[in-house]
Image (cartoon, coloured by chain):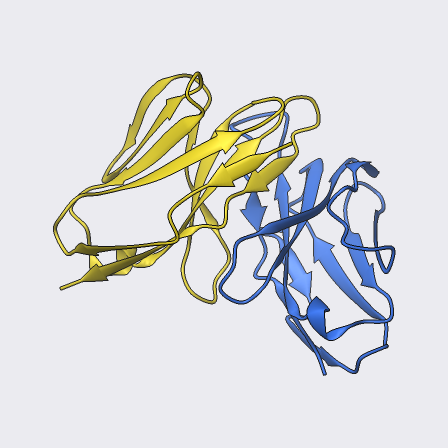
Amino acid sequence: GAGVSQSPSNKVTEKGKDVELRCDPISGHTALYWYRQRLGQGLEFLIYFQGNSAPDKSGLPSDRFSAERTGESVSTLTIQRTQQEDSAVYLCASSDRTSGLGELFFGEGSRLTVL
Amino acid sequence: GQNIDQPTEMTATEGAIVQINCTYQTSGFNGLFWYQQHAGEAPTFLSYNVLDGLEEKGRFSSFLSRSKGYSYLLLKELQMKDSASYLCAVRNTGGFKTIFGAGTRLFVKA
C-alpha cells in the first residue's frame, strides 16, 4: 500500500483479555518495527523484524507480549491477559534497508485502553 | 547498553532560531535520525546524519559529532506549526535496531 496501515485504530478492552494489533507495512519494506508510546512519553522499542525473523526481541516488556510476521509483510502484535499498564499507543513502522536512508515510516498507531 | 538524552521541553518565539540537543551512547552506531511528531499524530522523518558535520534541509539542519556522541537539530525562522515533539533516534550497526530518545516538546509562541 501507499503507507503503513495499522488496525484497529482504537481498542478498548477489559483487564485480562487478549488483544491483537495488526500492521501492514509499505510494500517491499523488509524491516518492520513495533514501538509503544505512553501518553506524553517517547517511543519505547518493543521488537523489530528483518524479513520474517525477529533478531531482537529485547524490548518486549513481558512474556505476555509476542509478535510475528508472515510473508515478509503483515505483522501481528499480541498482548495476552492485558493489564492497565499496557494502555498506550502502539506504533508500527517499516523501512527499506536496500535503498535510501532506511528511515522509518510510521503508521497512525493503535490506541489501546485497558479498563 | 544504549542511552539517548534530550531536553524535555523548550520554548521559542516565532521567527527565531532554536537548537535541540541530543547526546547518545550506543554499542554500535549506524546513523542518527530526527523525527517530528505533532500531538496525536505519527512521527515523520526530518533528517539523517551518519558522518560528522552539518546536513541542511531548508529551515531545518542537523549536526553530528560521532566522537562526542552528540547531535543537534537547528530550526530557523520558527513558525507556529513547528510546535511539536522532536525525537532523536539512533540506529545500530548489524541489525538496524533503532532506539528513540524521549523527545523534546517545542512550544513556539507568538
Q: In this image, B42 relative to A95: left or right?
A: left
Q: In this image, A20 relative to A94: left or right?
A: right
Give the residue drawn at x 58%, y 64%.
A38
Chain corresponding to blue in the figure? A
Residue A23, position in %: x, y? 71, 56
Q: In this image, B49 relative to A108: left or right?
A: left
- Nearer the observer, B78 or A114: A114
- Against A90, residue B24 (above or below) is above
- Nearer the observer, A10 or A1: A10
Image quadrant in which the C terminus of chain A is located: bottom right
Q: In this image, B22 relative to A13: left or right?
A: left
- Against B104, residue B27 (above or below) is above
Image quadrant in which you'd find residue A112: bottom right
Q: How many marks?
A: 0
Residue B16, position in %: x, y? 13, 48
- Against A97, residue B16 (above or below) is below
- Nearer the observer, A42 or B31: A42
Give the residue drawn at x 77%, y 50%.
A60
Residue A52, position in %: x, y? 83, 39
Give the residue drawn at x 72%, y 75%.
A84
In the rendered structure, the colour chosen for chain B is yellow
